[in-house]
Amino acid sequence: MLLKENDIIGGYTVKYLIKASEYASNYRVVNRVGESFFLKLFDMSKIPATAVTDGMPDEITGISRLNHPNIIKFIGKDSYTDSDGNAYQLLITEFLSGMLLSEMVSNGKLLAINEALPYYAAILQGLDYMHTTHELNHNDITPRNILLSKDGNGKVVPKIIDLGHIGESAMGCPKFTVSDLNLLYCAPETLSGMFKHTSDIFSATAVLYYMLKGVAPWNVDCSNAGSFQQKKGLVREARKKELDLSGIPDEYKEIFKYGLALNPDDRVSVKDLLGMIASPGSYKGKGSTNTNSNASSHTSANTNAGASSTAQSDSQRDSGSAQQDGGVEIKRNTGGGGGFKDVAGMDKLKQELTNRVIWIIKDKEKAEKYRITPPNGMLLYGPPGCGKTFFAEKFAEESGFNYMLVNGSDLGSTYIHGTQGKIAELFKKAKANAPIIVCFDEFDSFVPSRQSRSAEHRAEEINEFLAQLNNCSKHGIFVIGTTNLKEMIDPAILRKGRLDLQYEIPAPDLTTRHAMFKIHLKGRPLSEDISIDELAQKTEGYASSDIAFIVNEAAMMAALADRKIEHQDIINSINCNPSSLKTNARAKVGYK
């Protein structure tokens, strides 16, 4: 039985089908108050008897026991009988928005070792919980079963999903179907039907390799194999060769030596692997004691922070390295970024800034001849999610300047409530890394109007900002402030000689939305039925971030179903995700 849109089952309303297999189908559903969930419907007449215990699918029994931040969360279960007397079981799990790890890498986002290791650590910790607390294995860890999703604090957390092969260790006769496994990530012993805790460790380490290399270890093309047994033969043959570890730092090669050991007895524990991550090169060999006794807790405490850094560094890998200094990243401009080419629409604004700012920066000889100095900075204001901070970063790439983003929510304890000396130190660091663009996100939180009672105790800090902004362009510093609340900023900040330029970044107009869909869909596997014209028309009043989210969610649904992105996927995502702007009717559209 396949459910249709708006069908109601178990108190949930179906929004759309994600994928279907021989005995189960997956859906996005909403509850009575509109909250989204995943629902998996098991046809009990078709599910293999070996995958059922006491009338309940093992997947439901297994996942209902789990509660870990790196594993998809169990919400509930139910039973259903249709009018013909056919029995079904329902599994409801949390709905996670984000990007599959496989999708991120297939889009060309290979990770550096320090970026990939936090993800790897998070996967290991989730598996260790399953192994030690419940004696369960996942048995199908692949890049398609790792979802990168933000938690309540905005940190990116890798989540283990799709527990369709969950079960206890098996010695030659697993209870689940194996023909749908991706053999490139399966440990050698699983090809003979033996599934152990260390088999999951092999698969997780294979995923780490994929993050760094873009392919599975000992990668081999199995697409032309005529049978599952022939695929096994190709994989076994490929693993007779030496594993390619070129480009991986020597101190981290031990992770692959022990995590991808072909003999399961040569693999090490999660604790040992976490120790190798926290203290590379310190491992003394299997059977010895790791010298870093705090390795496991150290890695766990830093997993989310590292993962968040990874998710935010896609453009970093494209256009330069980032230097972490005092809590604020300095992104070096090496000329690799796309600049204004990456910005959809806003042609008038881009041309105006090219004429008023960028040419002065690039043609210093002519600027000196006419004694023209660039402005100190500019304010970008408008509704949230419309690309102000993104535009600031692309402006830095276009101008050739380094870039520093100072985020009020992340650095509030240091800067918003900081002393004059701390603010002065920030500008001192900017001067040392000039030419540079310093972008203050949520600028109103740094320099609130001194006329408000809440800012009375902030007068010294605001005065320091005023002093630092005066003629900062002479030191190669261009300041950009972004805000949703222009009226809350102290008026003295906005006068000429400080933030000389002010531009509104409104909700994208039709032309810009059309360009945004083209940018976000580029490079993804697409069906021929996609109409960007219709998508742009259906998203009037949507923020730029809304459109990026809609395309990403549609891509995730298609990836889970292992097919191309179809037009209806994006329409479904639009229907399930209204504009984040409070009132579409009030949102100004298009740069004027």
Image: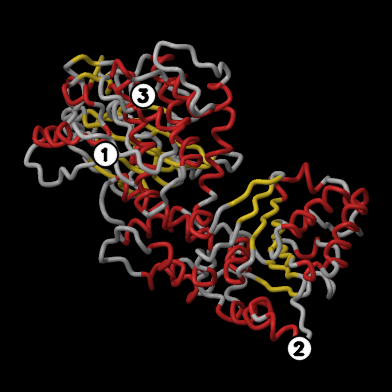
Residue occupied by mark 3: 258
| For residue 37, side relative to residue 498 (left or right) | left
Indicate the secondary structure of the residue bearing disc 2. Answer: loop
Mark 3 crowdedness (10 Å alpha carbons): few <14, some 14-19, many ≥20: many
- Asked if disc 3 and disc 1 are in contact, CB closer than 8 Å, the reply is no
Q: Amino acid at mark 2?
A: Tyr
Residue at 50% x, 40% y is 114
Q: Position of residue 21 (x, y in %)?
A: 21, 39
- Asked if disc 2 and disc 1 are in contact, CB closer than 8 Å, the reply is no
- Asked if disc 3 and disc 2 are in contact, CB closer than 8 Å, the reply is no
> How far apart, in angstroms, are the residues tagged by discs 3 and 1?
38 Å
Q: Name which of mark 2 and mark 1 comes first in the sequence.
A: 1
Residue occupied by mark 2: 370
The number of callouts visible is 3
| For residue 63, side relative to residue 513 (left or right) | left
Q: Name which of mark 3 and mark 1 comes first in the sequence.
A: 1
Q: Is residue 66 above or below residue 16?
A: above
Query: Do we see residue 59 in this rendering?
Result: no
> How far apart, in angstroms, are the residues tagged by discs 2 and 1?
70 Å
Residue occupied by mark 1: 25
User: Of the residues tagged 3 and 1, which is closer to the observer?
Assistant: 3
Task: Give 207 or 539, whichever is nearer the viewer.
Answer: 207
Q: Amino acid at mark 1?
A: Ser
Indicate the secondary structure of the residue bearing disc 1. Answer: strand
Q: Position of residue 332 (x, y in %)?
A: 60, 58
Residue farthest to the bottom, as pictured = 370
